Amino acid sequence: MRKLIFISIMLSVLGVFDVQAQRYDRGFDLNSTTFTKKGTWMIGGQVAYSTHKNEDYHFLIIEDINSTGYRFTVSPMFCYMVRDNMGLGMRFGYGRNLLKVDSANLSIDEIDINVKDYYTLSHDFSAMAIYRNYIPLGESKRFALFNETQLAYSTGQAKLIDGHGTSIVGTYEKSNSLSLGLNPGMVAFINDHVAVEVNVGMLGLQYTSVDQTHNQVYKGSRETTQINFKVNILSIGFGLAYYL
């Protein structure tokens, strides 16, 4: 009798593990190379927030840095799989950045440059068309590498105020940018529909134009073009995605 109970328990446990093992195949043939089926919708996004505070901080030749600031970004997205492991979609973004420098001193030999009561606030909006392709890892259909090619347009505004001296100096900037970049990453499914993503930015080509108005009178402009295929470790992003 005890042997029969023991065998029954073991079969039940093995059955549970068998269900768990099959849970992440997500209904696909384990021998196939399909990770995302044609016709699948993917909805997701990323949110990031960071702050900093310096008190009498020294950095290379910059001394006595007293500053505070933050950076907030949010980026919702959607993607439709036009073929197995290949998708097209859109990503939208918003970012807000604040930097307030109470004081800082730049010292080079006998030259001292003081920065005091410097304040800058900026925000930007972006929209980008994306193309994704997946490469599954292993046979469980749980992990995969992906590459996201992005064609993006962004616009932003910035306000800079310098209160150092007897008068307040203000500058207003408006920027527009067009870029083509690569974002490789990795995705891991938590269950059959929800996945966690991590990606690293690789800037390909970017053109930026900035129009500036100083003290509401003087105007200026700047145009820059960058070509860079280095991996930007500082732009690592984390996000969640829902596949349906």
Image (spheres, rainbow, N blue to C red):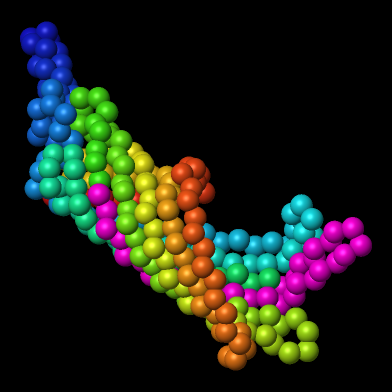
Q: Is residue 107 magenta?
A: yes
Which quarter of the figure has residue 176? bottom left
On screen, residue 244 versus residue 177, left or right, reads: left
Q: Give x and y (percent) for residue 39.
A: 9, 48
Q: Residue furthest right?
A: 110
**Residue 136 left/right relative to 66:** left
Q: Is 9 drawn above or below residue 20 in the view shown?
A: above
Quarter residue 221 falls in: bottom right
**In percent of the image, x 15 and y 47: which residue is there?**
81
242 up-or-down from 97: above or below: above
Asked if residue 237 lies left or right of residue 38, the reply is right
Q: Determine the residue positioned at 20% across, 52% down.
A: 88
Majority secondary structure of the magenta segment? strand
Residue 200: x, y in percent? 42, 45
Q: Position of residue 214 (x, y in %)?
A: 61, 85
Q: Residue at x 69, y 61 (%)?
A: 54
Q: Quadrant of residue 219?
A: bottom right
**Region of the chain picked out in magenta, as a range:** 102-131
Q: Nearer the viewer, residue 224 or 125?
A: 224
Instruction: Say which quadrant the N terminus sits in.
Output: top left
Going 13% across and 26% down the picture, which residue do you hit?
Answer: 32
